Image (cartoon, rainbow, N blue to C red):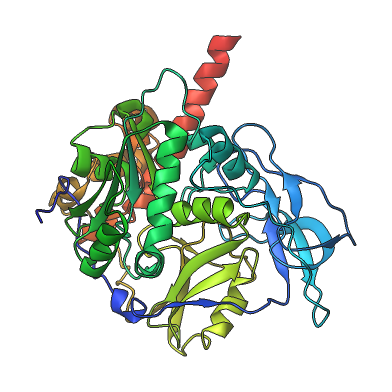
Amino acid sequence: MSTKTFPGGVHPPEEKELSAHKAFERFPAPTTIVLPLSQHIGKASTPRVKKKDAVVPGQLIAEAEGFISAPIHSSIAGTVKSISREVNAGGFPKDAIVIIPNGEEEPAEPEYFPPLPLDTITPEQIRERVKEAGIVGQGGAAFPTFVKLTPPPDKEIDTVMINGCECEPYLTRDYRFMIERPEAIAEGLRLIMLALGVKRGVFGIEDNKPDAIKAMEAAVQGMEGIEVAALKTKYPQGAEKMLIKAVNGREVPPGKLPLDVGVVIQNIGTAVAIYDSIAKGEPQITAALTVTGAGIKEPKNLIVPVGTPITEVLEFCGGVTEDASKVIVGGPMMGVAQYDLAAPVMKATSGIVVLTKKEMRKQEETPCLRCGKCVDACPLHLVPTKLSRYSQLGRFEEAEELGVTVCMECGTCAFTCPANIPLVQWLRLGKQEVMKLQRERKAEQST
């Protein structure tokens, strides 16, 4: 099978052997649950419960606020302790519902939705169930999935892609799903295609996962319009624009979205969540994630109640090693280093990576060598070194002209930089300042 790819990119060490062979395990009951009201792109949810209220698994405890939002359901049976500002894996405290579990009491009956028939379900029923279940994208951005299944009338969608690349080093959650639940994933894609009225579906999987490719090919046999595309193993192959370029050969213009070129992309985990919400009536109250890295004693792939503190997940995996140096939520390329391990697992948490000092690159920064490696590696054809310099100097309008807002912060530039310049941080600063300027201009024009 020929492999497809995109220009640019890098090849960081994969490090997937630590957890790739570990089947999913169910995490036992946590001692507390912290459910941030904002676990998705868009407006935060509005609480429907108050302090001392009793809740059961699957119960709606916060309603979506507006179109781009998602409801939140309790992941355990327990009592609401508080609605307060709590530490968050994203790095900033956010309003959250804190629940204390019932402990040794009789297990509460979950409050799930009635299952829907897979063979006669309608597009409207699919969209409504996905919305009610509070499903958000599992690829990292946590965009409310219902919105993706409701594109504007003027956008003609002809292809649905399921991102099975899992190009981030260390992470193996999507791989384990493809090995353990290929039929559910295939059916999830069929449901997405039905909701969008699309006839073509594609699984994009990197060629370092041959057994996952084989499993998915077997699962889609006889399913009309669905194919499996083997892609070259390269980071960031799983980024939306790169995936579309590799599979369809289409370029997503700067400032545009996949739907502007006729494509909707969903993650492997999202396809599973959609299937479970319809076939089993389950709202999104668990997160599938990889706990890995040389700094964790027992790497695992886990199914964890949303809201479980990171520290409890690490303890379940044997705890961290003596030389553990950094805990990252997500992958090492785009994840967020944690300053407080009381932060909770959220709906879109795909992994917890614990790195040792040996695994971390030397961070001593030296002057730019003007070698051009960051330019060659950038999958979006930007000039990271110049954009970084503009940001450092506060020349944000020039950074805007050079396309800083196009940057997706994938980290390929920083990975290749022999001078160890924190390019991503400078690019992120430049993006923030340019977007602030754009908002100011818009406000001036409207007055």
Q: Is residue 308 left or right of residue 291?
A: right
- At 50% from the left edge and 30% from the top edge, which residue is drawn? 150
Residue 400 shows up from this direction:
yes
- At 29% from the left edge and 43% from the top edge, which residue is drawn? 224
Pick the front one: 395 or 286: 286
As drawn, 408 above or below 333: above
Q: Residue furthest left?
A: 2
Q: Which quadrant holds the N terminus?
A: bottom left
Q: Position of residue 202 (x, y in %)?
A: 28, 45
- At 59% from the left edge and 63% from the top edge, which residue is drawn? 286
As drawn, 161 above or below 110: above
Q: Is residue 299 left or right of residue 85?
A: left
Q: How many numbered markers are drawn?
A: 0
Q: Residue furthest right?
A: 52
As drawn, 194 above or below 280: above
As drawn, 180 above or below 319: above
Pick the front one: 414 or 65: 65
Q: Position of residue 381 (x, y in %)?
A: 20, 39
Residue 256 shows up from this direction:
no
Picture quadrant where residue 446 is located? top right
Q: Position of residue 333 (x, y in %)?
A: 35, 60
Pick the front one: 329 or 395: 329
Q: Position of residue 153 (x, y in %)?
A: 46, 19
Q: Which quadrant holds the C terminus?
A: top right
Q: Residue furthest front?
A: 120
